[in-house]
Image (cartoon, rainbow, N blue to C red):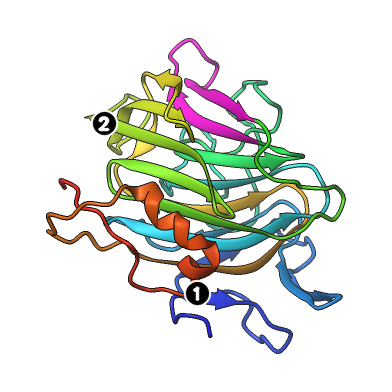
Amino acid sequence: MFPDWRHPFKETDTDLIPEGWKYEKPSGDADSEIVNESGDIGFFPSPNSELYTKEALSNPYVWVMRTRLSAGKVAQYFVRATHEKINNVRFTDTDGTKITYKDDDGNDVEKDVLGSNGISFRPHGTSVYIFIKQYDPSAPKKLNNKVVKIDDVANFIFPRGEYQDVAVVDDGKSVTIYFGDDLVVKISFSEKKKYDISNEEFYSKATVTGKDGSVLANVDNALISTKSVLCIAANDIIGVGEIGYTEYKIESNPQTVDTAAFMAFGVVMLLGMVVLKRRTIEV
C-alpha cells in the first residue's frame, strides 16, 4: 500500500499529474501518456517537457521516485532549483509555449546541461553525472556547471532499461542521493549569497562527497537555492513509475543516526514509511 504522499501511476488515471506538481511541454508537442509494458506501468512525458513542483519547498524533505530512461539521451532530476529564469535560461517558460531549459547557458560542458540553477543529476549507462550550477562572470550568460561523474552506480540499459528506485534526502544543509539501497553522492552547502543575475538568494559553497566519504569536488560561486523546486526535465521520453515527496521531520532526539543509516532498511522500506529513520541536525 502506498503512503498518501507517493503517487503511483496507473492505467486508470484520468488526471496524470500528481497533486502539487505541474507538467509543461512545448506548444503542439505530443501529450504525456500512461503506458503499460509487460506489467510495468509508467508515466511517459512527451519529449522536451518538465514535471516540477508548483511550490518551492522550504523545509527538509524526502523525494522518492521510480524512474528510467527509455530513449537514452537526456533527462535530469533537479533539486534546490528556483522557478526563476536567469539570462533566458530555465527549465521551462511559464506559459508552456517555449522550452528553454536545454543548454542555453552558452556552455558545452557535458552537452545538453539543463536549467539555470540548482543541483541536478543525470543517469547514463552505469554512471551518474552530478551538475551544480555556478555563477561565472566570464561565461556568455554568467552561468557555468561543475560536473562530477560517478561510475558503477546502476545499470541504465538503453533504449529500455529497468526502473530504478531513487531517493533524495534534503536535510537543509545537504542533499544526499540514493539509487536502490546505495548512497551515490552527498552535496553539502553553506554561505548564503546574492548575485547580480538574480533576485534570489543562493548557497555559494558546496562540497561533493562520494559514498565512502571522500571529497570529489569543492564548488565556489554555486547557485544552490535556499529553497527547493523539484523537477524532472527531459529532452527525450523517460518513464516515471512513481513519484512523491514528504517533509523530512527532524526531531530533537539525543540519539543520532547518520542520514545514510536509514538506507539500510532499503528503499522499499523507505517508500513504505512516512516516518523515516531520523537524525538530529541543527537547523
SS state under label 2:
strand
Q: Residue at x 47, y 20 (%)?
A: 142
Main SS of the magenta part reads strand
Circle 2 sits on which residue? 190
Q: Does residue 14 sit above or below 115 in this rendering? A: below
Q: Residue at x 62, y 82 (%)?
A: 15
Q: Which residues are magenta?
A: 128-150
Is 29 part of what is drawn in magenta? no
Binning the other alpha carbons within 10 Å of mark 2 as few (below 14), some (14 to 19) or many (20 upward) gives some
* Residue 228 in sight: no
Q: Nearer the viewer, residue 256 or 216?
A: 256
Does residue 137 show up magenta in the picture?
yes
> Does residue 92 appear left or right of residue 168 in this picture?
right
Whether residue 151 appears in this view of the structure is: yes
Residue at x 53% of width, y 53% of height: 231
Residue 195 location (% of width, % of height): 31, 25
Q: Which quadrant of the figure has residue 147?
A: top right
Which amino acid lies under the numbered mark 1 shown in the image of this protein? Arg
Image point (40%, 59%), residue name: 62
Across and down, in percent, residue 37 comes to 85, 73
Earlier along the polypeptide chain: callout 1 or callout 2?
1
* Relative to 189, 95 lies left or right: right
